[in-house]
Image: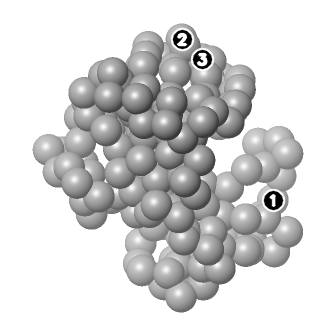
Amino acid sequence: MVSSTAFKQASFKQTAVKQGYLSSDPNRIVRIRIRHQKGYITIKGLGNTTGASRYEWEKEIPLDEAEKLLEICESGIISKTRYEIKSGNHIIEVDEFHGENQGLVVAEVELANEDEPFQKPDWLGAEVTGDKKYYNSILKKNPFTRW
């Protein structure tokens, strides 16, 4: 989680993201996403025991197809702004959620392995890796504003 809005001043890029789920089954999540006026389909497998890593496959698809697929997704479309922040040799992605998840801000950093060190900015809050209630596929079913 993120404990302040200081990340906004540190960001070098902002992107609007809209995404839905054709399948939110934890064994095979199928996500449709639109960002940068491009469409994507992503398939995620079941994560490891800590929740820090899992199989992920993503492919760009035409924007019009992504828009049509969003129309047939399960209910609960996720809307958020993604901020990218450089921290040492890493990029931290911070998602500020909108709609029914308004008020939730979550950060993620891709590491080569779970033990790889990275520079943690002062604004970075509590660790929520592996806490399923923060997964986007769960947030669509149980939004932050209902916690």
- Depth check, mark 2 against mark 1: the one in front is 2
The reply to whether the C-beta atoms of the residues labelled 2 and 3 are less than 8 Å apart is yes
Q: Is residue 122 left or right of residue 17?
A: right
- In this picture, is 77 found above or below 22? below
Q: Is residue 113 left or right of residue 107?
A: right
Q: Residues within 10 Å of mark 3 (few under 14, many from 20)?
A: some
Q: Residue at x 85, y 45 (%)?
A: 112
Label 1 secondary element: loop
- Depth check, mark 3 against mark 1: the one in front is 3
- The amino acid type, in three-letter code, at marker 2 is Asn
Image quarter (top left, top right, bottom left or bottom right) of the C terminus: top left
Between marks 2 and 3, how big is the CA–CA gap?
5 Å
- In this picture, is 77 found above or below 123? above
In the image, residue 37 lies at what x, y percent?
A: 55, 54
Identify the residue at the far left of this view. Answer: 146
- The amino acid type, in three-letter code, at marker 3 is Leu
**Which residue was labeled with disc 1?**
117
Between marks 2 and 1, how big is the CA–CA gap?
29 Å
Q: Which mark is residue 46?
A: 3
Label 2 or label 3, whichever comes before in sequence order: 2
Residue 55 shows up from this direction:
yes
Closest to the observer: 77 or 68?
68
**Which residue was labeled with disc 2?**
27
Image quarter (top left, top right, bottom left or bottom right) of the N terminus: bottom left
Question: Residue 19, located in which quarter of the rendered image?
Answer: top left
Residue 21 shows up from this direction:
no
